[in-house]
Amino acid sequence: EIVMTQSPATLSVSPGERATLSCRASQSVGSNLAWYQQKPGQAPRLLIYITSTRATGIPARFSGSGSGTEFTLTISSLQSEDFAVYYCQQYNIWPRSFGQGTKVEIK
Amino acid sequence: QVQLHQWGAGLLKPSETLSLTCGVSGGSFSGYYWSWIRQPPGKGLEWIGEMNYSGITNYNPSLKTRVTISLDTSKNQFSLKLTSVTAADTAVYYCARGPYISVWGQGTLVTVSS
């Protein structure tokens, strides 16, 4: 089973600043890595798949990078609606697995 | 635009069987993995398992002995059964289209309590 580890657990950022979230896999997942955003009381929303492809309707300020075991989600200039919890997920090997999440909060 | 709508009992007693169904509208079953994911209150996401159009299933090993996912293409539905539930199974359960989850159901809070 692949363990996904996200860091930091909480990221305090001011609006307009850049946020960088990390996700590490316990073994290679190739490029089969997705990122999700979740707000309270809502289902998660797909942001990025295949490491760096933005899902439909996702603003260009969200970008993903990495490969193998190290991945990054970057939000170039945080907007008020971006404060949420972010999860990474590998879908390369069964069982699929999620990271524990990074909460992006207002500084 | 594919949409998922799920339903099922929200309150169970320990040892009972959790049963949820997810209706698929606006799209085809083929080419995707039809998944169930859960989220305990205040915690992260846990992948339960999935089935593809060919009927191949994959389950989380931690739940494998208790989980069954099935597909009914004639009704455009897929279902989750989880047997012998305990309080640890209390969570919001989501149906979803995978393998990366591009479509989510609305979620169902299932509470296990005596």
Image (tube, coloured by chain):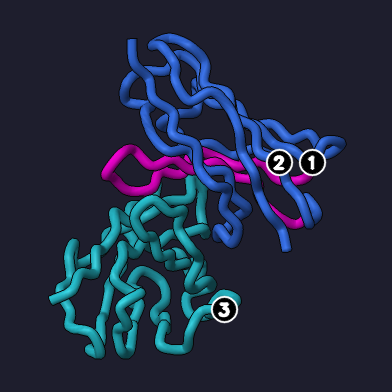
Q: Residue at x 65, y 48 (%)?
A: B4
Furthest-right residue in this view: B74
**Which residue is under mark 3?**
A57
**Could you say whether the residue bearing mark 1 is in a helix, strand or loop?**
loop
* Crowding near the residue tagged with mark 1, few <14, some 14–19, many ≥20 C-alpha atoms within 10 Å: some
Q: Chain of mark 2?
A: B
Question: Residue B84, image x and y in percent?
Answer: 45, 13
**Could you say whether the residue bearing mark 2 is in a helix, strand or loop?**
strand
- Cβ–Cβ under 8 Å for marks 3 and 2: no
Q: Chain of mark 3?
A: A
Q: Amino acid at mark 3?
A: Gly
Q: Amino acid at mark 2?
A: Gly
Q: CA distance from mark 3 to mark 1?
A: 26 Å
- Give above or below for B37 relative to A92: above
- Give above or below for B58 relative to A85: above
- Cβ–Cβ under 8 Å for marks 2 and 1: yes
Give the residues drawn in magenta, as a range.
B31-54
Question: Residue A23, image x and y in percent?
Answer: 31, 67
Q: Amino acid at mark 1?
A: Asn
- Give above or below for B76 relative to A12: above
Q: Nearer the viewer, residue B52 or B78?
A: B78
In the figure, residue B92 lies in which quadrant? Answer: top left
Question: Residue A104, image x and y in percent?
Answer: 24, 69
- In the rendered structure, find residue B23 and report the number of the disc placed on it: 2
Q: How many marks?
A: 3
Whether residue B23 is visible, yes or no, is yes
- In the rendered structure, find residue B76 and report the number of the disc placed on it: 1
